[in-house]
Image (cartoon, rainbow, N blue to C red):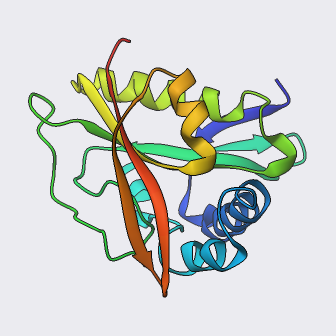
Amino acid sequence: MDYEIRVALASDVAAIAALIASSARGLSWDVYSAEQIEAAISSVFGVDSELISDGTYFVAEGGGGELIGCGGWSHRRTLFGGDQADSRESGELDPKRDAAKIRAFFVHPNWARRGVGRAILERCEREAHEAGFRSLELMATLPGLDFYRAMGYEAREEIHYPASGQVLRFVKMEKRSGQ
Protein backbone atom coordinates (compact mmCIF):
# COMPACT_ATOMS: atom_id res chain seq x y z
CA MET A 1 0.00 0.00 0.00
CA ASP A 2 1.50 3.33 -1.12
CA TYR A 3 -0.69 5.41 1.19
CA GLU A 4 -1.89 5.75 4.76
CA ILE A 5 -5.47 6.25 5.96
CA ARG A 6 -5.80 8.73 8.81
CA VAL A 7 -8.42 10.90 10.48
CA ALA A 8 -8.88 14.19 8.62
CA LEU A 9 -7.83 17.36 10.43
CA ALA A 10 -9.10 20.93 10.16
CA SER A 11 -5.73 21.78 8.60
CA ASP A 12 -6.60 19.42 5.69
CA VAL A 13 -9.65 21.42 4.53
CA ALA A 14 -7.97 23.22 1.61
CA ALA A 15 -6.33 20.02 0.35
CA ILE A 16 -9.62 18.09 0.70
CA ALA A 17 -11.46 20.80 -1.28
CA ALA A 18 -8.86 20.56 -4.05
CA LEU A 19 -9.08 16.76 -4.04
CA ILE A 20 -12.89 16.88 -4.31
CA ALA A 21 -12.72 19.21 -7.31
CA SER A 22 -10.04 17.08 -9.03
CA SER A 23 -12.02 13.91 -8.41
CA ALA A 24 -15.30 15.36 -9.67
CA ARG A 25 -13.72 16.80 -12.80
CA GLY A 26 -11.55 13.79 -13.55
CA LEU A 27 -13.95 10.94 -12.82
CA SER A 28 -17.38 12.37 -13.71
CA TRP A 29 -16.93 13.69 -17.23
CA ASP A 30 -18.41 10.59 -18.88
CA VAL A 31 -21.71 10.69 -16.90
CA TYR A 32 -22.24 14.37 -16.09
CA SER A 33 -21.85 17.40 -18.36
CA ALA A 34 -19.16 20.00 -17.63
CA GLU A 35 -21.93 22.34 -16.43
CA GLN A 36 -23.32 19.69 -14.06
CA ILE A 37 -19.86 18.97 -12.66
CA GLU A 38 -19.15 22.65 -11.96
CA ALA A 39 -22.64 23.07 -10.43
CA ALA A 40 -21.99 20.07 -8.17
CA ILE A 41 -18.61 21.42 -7.06
CA SER A 42 -20.01 24.88 -6.30
CA SER A 43 -23.23 23.88 -4.55
CA VAL A 44 -23.20 20.23 -3.42
CA PHE A 45 -19.77 18.60 -3.33
CA GLY A 46 -17.43 20.04 -0.77
CA VAL A 47 -15.87 19.70 2.63
CA ASP A 48 -18.23 18.87 5.47
CA SER A 49 -16.53 20.42 8.49
CA GLU A 50 -18.96 18.64 10.81
CA LEU A 51 -17.55 15.25 9.76
CA ILE A 52 -14.05 16.50 10.46
CA SER A 53 -15.09 17.86 13.89
CA ASP A 54 -16.80 14.57 14.70
CA GLY A 55 -13.61 12.63 13.86
CA THR A 56 -15.46 10.42 11.34
CA TYR A 57 -13.85 11.71 8.14
CA PHE A 58 -10.70 10.13 6.75
CA VAL A 59 -8.08 10.94 4.19
CA ALA A 60 -5.71 8.71 2.30
CA GLU A 61 -2.30 10.34 2.22
CA GLY A 62 0.23 9.33 -0.42
CA GLY A 63 3.91 8.86 0.32
CA GLY A 64 4.68 12.44 -0.67
CA GLY A 65 2.07 13.82 1.74
CA GLU A 66 -0.53 14.58 -0.96
CA LEU A 67 -4.14 13.64 -0.31
CA ILE A 68 -5.31 10.96 -2.75
CA GLY A 69 -8.70 10.02 -1.29
CA CYS A 70 -11.25 10.98 1.33
CA GLY A 71 -14.52 9.77 2.79
CA GLY A 72 -16.34 9.31 6.03
CA TRP A 73 -19.36 8.18 7.95
CA SER A 74 -21.74 10.08 10.16
CA HIS A 75 -24.09 9.67 13.10
CA ARG A 76 -25.93 12.80 11.93
CA ARG A 77 -28.97 13.12 9.64
CA THR A 78 -27.27 14.82 6.67
CA LEU A 79 -27.07 12.29 3.85
CA PHE A 80 -24.94 14.29 1.41
CA GLY A 81 -23.47 17.69 0.64
CA GLY A 82 -20.65 19.86 1.91
CA ASP A 83 -20.94 22.89 4.18
CA GLN A 84 -22.41 24.94 1.31
CA ALA A 85 -25.21 22.46 0.44
CA ASP A 86 -28.90 23.05 1.15
CA SER A 87 -29.34 19.39 2.18
CA ARG A 88 -27.75 19.75 5.64
CA GLU A 89 -29.50 18.37 8.70
CA SER A 90 -27.29 18.09 11.81
CA GLY A 91 -29.58 16.15 14.15
CA GLU A 92 -28.25 12.96 15.75
CA LEU A 93 -29.23 9.49 14.56
CA ASP A 94 -30.34 6.60 16.80
CA PRO A 95 -28.21 3.53 15.93
CA LYS A 96 -31.05 1.22 16.98
CA ARG A 97 -33.41 2.51 14.30
CA ASP A 98 -31.45 4.75 11.89
CA ALA A 99 -28.80 4.01 9.30
CA ALA A 100 -25.35 5.58 9.62
CA LYS A 101 -24.55 7.85 6.69
CA ILE A 102 -21.62 7.09 4.40
CA ARG A 103 -20.45 10.48 3.21
CA ALA A 104 -18.32 12.48 0.81
CA PHE A 105 -16.15 9.86 -0.90
CA PHE A 106 -13.71 11.18 -3.48
CA VAL A 107 -10.55 9.67 -4.97
CA HIS A 108 -7.96 11.48 -7.04
CA PRO A 109 -8.23 10.32 -10.69
CA ASN A 110 -4.61 9.12 -10.67
CA TRP A 111 -5.49 6.77 -7.79
CA ALA A 112 -8.87 5.50 -9.01
CA ARG A 113 -9.43 1.74 -8.95
CA ARG A 114 -6.38 1.09 -6.77
CA GLY A 115 -8.16 0.22 -3.50
CA VAL A 116 -8.14 3.68 -1.90
CA GLY A 117 -11.92 4.08 -1.77
CA ARG A 118 -12.36 0.49 -0.60
CA ALA A 119 -9.88 0.95 2.26
CA ILE A 120 -11.61 4.11 3.46
CA LEU A 121 -15.09 2.60 3.10
CA GLU A 122 -14.13 -0.54 5.03
CA ARG A 123 -12.83 1.63 7.89
CA CYS A 124 -16.05 3.68 7.88
CA GLU A 125 -18.23 0.59 7.90
CA ARG A 126 -16.24 -0.95 10.75
CA GLU A 127 -16.42 2.21 12.87
CA ALA A 128 -20.15 2.68 12.23
CA HIS A 129 -20.74 -0.94 13.24
CA GLU A 130 -18.66 -0.44 16.40
CA ALA A 131 -20.82 2.63 17.20
CA GLY A 132 -23.89 0.36 17.15
CA PHE A 133 -25.26 1.00 13.66
CA ARG A 134 -26.65 -2.04 11.86
CA SER A 135 -27.40 -0.40 8.55
CA LEU A 136 -25.76 2.17 6.30
CA GLU A 137 -27.02 4.51 3.61
CA LEU A 138 -25.44 6.85 1.12
CA MET A 139 -26.18 9.04 -1.85
CA ALA A 140 -24.10 7.77 -4.77
CA THR A 141 -23.00 9.85 -7.69
CA LEU A 142 -23.27 8.06 -11.03
CA PRO A 143 -19.51 7.34 -11.24
CA GLY A 144 -19.68 5.65 -7.81
CA LEU A 145 -22.57 3.27 -8.51
CA ASP A 146 -20.52 0.26 -9.61
CA PHE A 147 -18.10 0.69 -6.69
CA TYR A 148 -20.87 0.80 -4.09
CA ARG A 149 -22.68 -2.15 -5.69
CA ALA A 150 -19.45 -4.15 -5.52
CA MET A 151 -19.24 -3.24 -1.82
CA GLY A 152 -22.70 -4.67 -1.15
CA TYR A 153 -24.91 -1.57 -1.37
CA GLU A 154 -28.30 -1.79 -3.05
CA ALA A 155 -29.94 1.02 -5.00
CA ARG A 156 -33.18 2.23 -3.41
CA GLU A 157 -34.18 5.45 -5.12
CA GLU A 158 -33.01 7.70 -7.94
CA ILE A 159 -32.85 11.38 -7.00
CA HIS A 160 -32.90 14.37 -9.37
CA TYR A 161 -31.26 17.14 -7.35
CA PRO A 162 -31.33 20.81 -8.44
CA ALA A 163 -27.93 22.49 -8.20
CA SER A 164 -27.02 25.94 -9.53
CA GLY A 165 -29.39 25.75 -12.49
CA GLN A 166 -28.52 22.12 -13.29
CA VAL A 167 -30.18 18.85 -12.33
CA LEU A 168 -27.89 16.15 -10.96
CA ARG A 169 -28.82 12.49 -10.90
CA PHE A 170 -27.87 10.61 -7.72
CA VAL A 171 -28.89 7.21 -6.37
CA LYS A 172 -29.76 6.56 -2.73
CA MET A 173 -28.26 3.22 -1.65
CA GLU A 174 -28.42 1.08 1.50
CA LYS A 175 -26.56 -1.81 3.12
CA ARG A 176 -27.10 -3.83 6.26
CA SER A 177 -23.99 -3.79 8.45
CA GLY A 178 -22.05 -7.04 8.29
CA GLN A 179 -22.98 -7.80 4.67
Is 148 located above or below residue 73 in the figure? above
x and y, in percent, of residue 32 in the image: 65, 64
Q: Position of residue 51 (x, y in %)?
A: 41, 55
Q: Residue at x 33, y 38 (%)?
A: 137
Question: Between 18 and 80, which is closer to the camera in this rendering?
Answer: 80
- Residue at the image point whose x is 63% and y is 27% from the top: 119
Side of 28 where 121 appears, left or right: left
Residue 21 picture location, percent across and down: 70, 68
- Eyeballing the image, is 95 above or below 74? above
For the point 39% across and 69% down, which residue is it? 161
Residue 159 shows up from this direction:
yes
Q: Residue furthest top?
A: 178
Left or right, 5 with respect to 112, comes to: left
Does residue 7 appear anywhere in the picture?
A: no
The residue lying toward the viewer, choosing from 20 and 127, is: 20
Question: In the rendered image, which quarter contains the C terminus?
Answer: top left
Up/down of 24 relative to 68, above or below: below
Q: Does residue 81 appear left or right of residue 25 in this picture?
A: left
Residue at horizontal 60 percent and vertical 33 percent from the top:
146
Quadrant into which the N terminus falls: top right
- Nearer the observer, 114 or 128: 114
Q: Quadrant of residue 162?
A: bottom left
Image spot of residue 98 (x, y percent): 15, 37
Tell me: residue 163, above or below residue 62.
Answer: below
